[in-house]
Image (tube, rainbow, N blue to C red):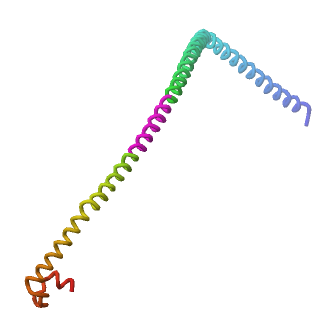
Amino acid sequence: MDQQTLLVIMAVFTAVAAIALAMQAALTFGIYKSSKAMSEKVAHLAPKVEALAETSRITLEESRVSLREITIRTTEILDSTRRQLARVEEVIEDASSRARVQMDRAELVMDDAMTRTQETIAVVHSGIMKPIREINGVATGLRAALNYFMRGGRPHPDEATADEEMFI
């Protein structure tokens, strides 16, 4: 390669490098302009963001105070509920023990009534039914004796009644 060609090639590459540098400078200037526009927009929004942050901080402080009050009230309600629940348990235990005592008493009354009923039945059987059976036995014996004497002896088997047939 001769020198002339080499110089042309170097001139072309230098021109390409110069164009690239010019393009880079133009792009850098474009980035500068867009960052300047962005900073103006951010500067315009900064007071609004600061106002929003301040409002949020005030609201958060108020919420904390309200939350403390709610927590205190909730704790008081829970304590009151625990005390009332303890009282309810005492009342239920008392009612349960009283009901148990009343059931025991009712059972004693029922046992006493049953015992007295059984004693009364025993008295009726021994005092009333036994004499009635004895009287009935004597009356049956008298009837059999009168039948025997009235008929003149034992009845003939053909004349036996249904009761007598069952006995025989």
Q: Position of residue 88 (x, y in %)?
A: 47, 30
Is 123 situated left or right of 89 in this image? left
Of 61 and 37, which appears nearest the observer? 61
Of 83 and 143, which appears nearest the observer? 143
User: Is 168 colored magenta in this rendering?
Assistant: no
Q: Where 31 falls versus 136 (above or below)?
A: above
Residue 50 in view in this figure: yes
Q: Where 131 falls versus 111 (above or below)?
A: below
Image point (49%, 28%), residue name? 87
Instruction: Report the magenta residues as a range.
Output: 87-106
Is 49 situated left or right of 28 in this image? left
Q: Position of residue 34 (x, y in %)?
A: 66, 17
Q: Where 91 falls versus 57 (above or below)?
A: below
Per the picture, the main secondary structure of the magenta-coloured stretch is helix
Image point (26%, 65%), residue name? 130
User: Is 93 colored magenta in this rendering?
Assistant: yes
Of 160 and 1, which appears nearest the observer? 160
